[in-house]
Image (tube, rainbow, N blue to C red):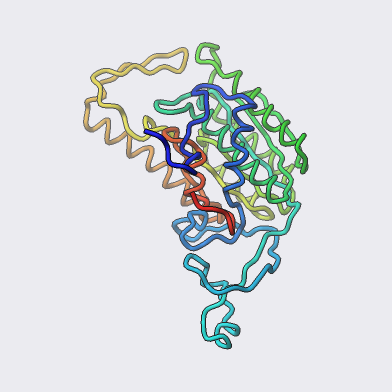
Amino acid sequence: MKAARGSREEKPVEGRAHVSVHDLIRLRAQGRDLTLLPRQPIRSQLAGIHGSRLRGRGLDFDELRAYQPGDDIRDIDWKVTARMRRPHTRIYTEERNRPALLIVDQRVNMFFGSRLHMKSVTAAHAASLVMWRILAQGDRPGAIVFDDQDRIEIRPQRSEARATRILRAIEQMNRSLRADDGRRSNPSQLNDILRHADRLATHDHLVVLISDLDGFDEDTHQLLNRLTRHNDALVLLVNDPLERELPEAALLIVSDGELQLEFDARDRGLREEFSLDFEKMVSMGRKELHKRNVPMLPISTTRPAAGQLRALLGHPPGSRRR
């Protein structure tokens, strides 16, 4: 069956296990269809379930127009509304040339996926989409791309060359992931990277963390608190269905590369405990992030990242809905 015209966000990017710079460049047009403006419509999930929202460095008044469904009622100009006898909304645009820092997780625990893509690939696609949107709205993209031992740091700058450097760094880290290289997972690397990000993002940055949050603990809470004192932050939680629910199978064998464990996945109590542990982790993380006005948005390996981000973040003002 042919896809409907305009539904390009549902077409998977090639490469289930690894990405290429070419793959990430192909996402440019779809990235322009996202919005990262700090003031989102009420229905946008950037507002979060509990009302978390990005502050933004600043907003410039753009225009005054008649109220449209989906406009934030807090932007209604009541004086003009009373004079014109119909609701009118004040429209704002974000200040340009804002620095942004993408923190992209490519650790070995991200080299896992049961459906469309590995988590590492989903994270790479999401990072590329967000970066293209940052560049399109006149801001300066930078990045920290990291694995279990190393990091590649690219300071924010608004240029095509800088965007390409970020994509090449993502490709380099991503393509080094192998299931049989004996690399051990390093949960503490997450906090080490956030400490480094705190030194880089001193003021008025947009910090976007794209990770499965392996290693998230109390220190992570404190580091995010420091980061968000003078910056905005957004967390994209990359996850796979097998992390939420065990498959209906008799015996499963799991391994970390050295040790191996066999268990019966038909055990109802085990299955319920497994799902509960994951939901508890997500709930605690969302609750702690909400205290710091940091939205946490789930990105699954089951579908292309572009369509998911568009559903979560919305469209830029005046863009064509797909």
Q: Is residue 223 above or below residue 149?
A: below
Q: Position of residue 128 (x, y in %)?
A: 61, 36
Q: Position of residue 256 (x, y in %)?
A: 45, 18
- If the image is split into quadrants, where does the N terminus sit? top left
- Name the foreground residue: 12 vs 60: 12
Q: Is residue 79 above or below residue 260?
A: below
- Name the foreground residue: 107 vs 166: 166
Q: Position of residue 233 (x, y in %)?
A: 61, 49
Determine whether, in the image, residue 200 is placed left or right of residue 180.
right
**In terms of image quadrants, where is residue 129?**
top right
- Name the foreground residue: 161 vs 85: 85
Determine whether, in the image, residue 91 is placed left or right of residue 108.
right
Q: Position of residue 278 (x, y in %)?
A: 38, 38
* Rendered residue at 70%/62% (across/down): 58
Q: Is residue 204 above or below residue 184?
A: below
- Count of numbered circles in the view: 0
* Rendered residue at 47%/27% (across/down): 117
Determine whether, in the image, residue 281 is placed left or right of residue 193.
left
Q: Is residue 1 above or below residue 312?
A: above
- Name the foreground residue: 102 vs 189: 102
* Rendered residue at 33%/39% (across/down): 276
* Rendered residue at 54%/36% (across/down): 211
